[in-house]
Amino acid sequence: MALIHIPAGTGHAVTLRAGQSLRIVNVEGGQVADFIAFNAGDMNEALSTVHTLVSIGRLFPTKGDALRTNRRRKMVEITRDDTGRHDLLIAACDPWRYEYDFGVRGHRSCSDNFLDVLREWRIERHQLPHPINFFQNMRYPEGRVEFDRSLAKPGDVVELRALMDLVAAVSACPMDLNPISNFRTHDLAIEVV
């Protein structure tokens, strides 16, 4: 499959067969990529960051780690990780995050991006799993939550090998009101290989 361009603040969904890989490219650097996935044969089985956290035993997944489903099965394996800093804890941005935390209505959000690109599969908001936020640099000093700028450089890649047939979605996170993407959004690209 050819490289698919994801404009800043939008998303894209793809299907993968077991054994295929999804390459997520940080085109300009500094951009967070929210990622969710579903078992293509049973959309009730989805990526689970909390089950992944328990399985890998650390906050920051990296190359060699398998991301788990809500049934604790291995879903994808990280086979390439140029940045080494990703987040399992922070929820996808949604309309209420922008309204309640920033006083902004009508701002694009990752959860809305996921709903848009997963319409074909009839996914509703309550079915969206918590995402893994690739390239998101979070710090937790003394248990506090601190959002920091992404460490991703132009061309950095995360590559995921599917361990089951999947429907996967990526959002070029629209968050431009905190430092995670340096207060502006950037393009991403994805490729199924």
Image: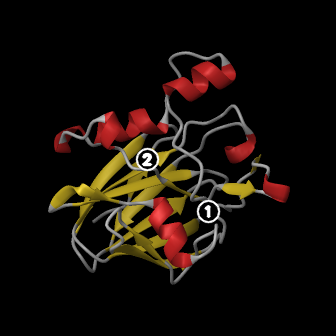
Q: Amino acid at mark 1?
A: His
Residue 74: image location, x then y, percent = 35, 76
Residue indicated by mark 2: 6
Q: Amino acid at mark 2?
A: Ile
- Front disc: 2 or 1: 1
Q: Is residue 15 above or below residue 91?
A: below
Residue 53: image location, x then y, percent = 54, 68
In the figure, residue 23 lies in which quadrant? bottom left
Residue 73: image location, x then y, percent = 33, 74
Earlier along the polypeptide chain: callout 2 or callout 1? 2
Helix, strand or loop under label 2: strand
In the figure, residue 93 lies in which quadrant? top right
Query: Within 10 angstroms of label 2, few (less than 14), some, or many (20 or more) residues?
Result: some
Residue indicated by mark 1: 86
Question: What residue lies at 56% left-to-right and 56% top-to-bottom?
Answer: 27
Question: What residue lies at 64% left-to-right and 55% top-to-bottom?
Answer: 136
Q: Nearer the viewer, residue 142 or 66?
A: 142
Q: Residue furthest bottom?
A: 64
Question: What residue lies at 38% left-to-right and 60% top-to-bottom?
Answer: 47
Q: Is residue 82 above or below residue 104?
A: below
Q: Is residue 85 left or right of residue 109?
A: right
Query: Within 10 angstroms of label 1, few (less than 14), some, or many (20 or more) residues?
Result: many
- The way the protein has been coloured in the rendering is secondary structure
Location of the C terminus by quadrant is: bottom left
Residue 44: image location, x then y, percent = 23, 54
Mark 2 and mark 1: Cα distance apart in space: 19 Å
**CB atoms of marks 2 and 1 within 8 Å:** no
